[in-house]
Amino acid sequence: MMKKIIFMLCISLLIFTSCSSEGNTSQNAETSRVPKQQIISSLDNPVTIDFVFDGNKIVSSTHSGNYVVKYTYTADLITKTESSDLIKEYIYTNGKLATYLRKLPGRDYYDKYSYTYESNDVVSFVVTRITISTGAEEVISAKNIYTLKDGNIIKYETKSSVTTYKYDNKNSPMRNVLGFNKIFEEQPQVSSSVNNVTSYTVTLADNSSYTNEITYSYDGDNFPTVINYKALSFISTYSY
């Protein structure tokens, strides 16, 4: 059940780590506004996520009372997240993410994501698996590419697929969380942006494709209160 919950969280958290871009939109976000709670419904067991902040720095998120993710900052940059089954470490060069280490406790390996900034709007990365006991490294995912625009990932290219994203001009729920705009993740579906993804189209190597749509209800300050993931048949609700 926990694996299913985490999978759904990964899909739903289009707001949980963001693309690294200096771009912005004309939307005037309240700079102090951060979410207090997220509820993911239409699961076998709905999930409630309670957030704790110190100002605009996220301290922790607690998932249905027993799964906790803790965050560590160095100055204004997130350098580590920790939970019972996953540790993520982030290393920066000149304020930009250079390396992301994904570690599973109890395993004799970890995955290393190495980022190259091809231009202001194009970032590539390679994933290697490092065996702790021997130090051996193996490439498990060759060059992958993000294309960015105005603080949003608009294209994600891998060996097997190309995903393109469309956005609204409103505020993503975690837009104001300090440090999130510096972090990439292994999949944009787990990533946040300045704005909210309204649809994404996946084109596979055989040229077949499919499109998923996401709809939103907003409050008076243009932050989402309800997100409807139609293709996945579940809804995510936010309170601030």
Image (spheres, rainbow, N blue to C red):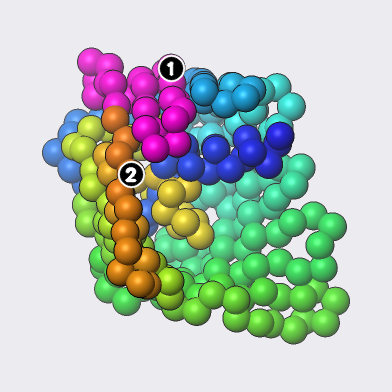
- Tell me: 24 left or right of 153: left
Residue at the spot of label 1 = 239
Q: Where is residue 2 in the image (x, y as percent from the top left)?
A: 70, 36
Residue in the picture at 47% in, 56% down: 187
Tag shown at residue 212? 2
**How would you rate the neighbour count of disc 1 (Cα within 10 Å): few for under 14, some for 14-19, many for 20 or more?**
some
Please identify the quadrant where the C terminus is shown: top left
State whether residue 193 is above or below residue 207: above
Camera sees residue 205: yes
Query: Majority secondary structure of the magenta segment?
Result: strand
Magenta segment includes 225: yes
SS state under label 1? strand
Q: Position of residue 25 (x, y in %)?
A: 18, 43
> Residue flagged by tag 2: what amino acid is it?
Asn
> Residue flagged by tag 1: what amino acid is it?
Ser
Please identify the quadrant where the N terminus is shown: top right
> Based on the displayed image, in which of its 4 quarters is residue 235 positioned?
top left
Q: What stretch is highlighted in magenta?
A: 216-240
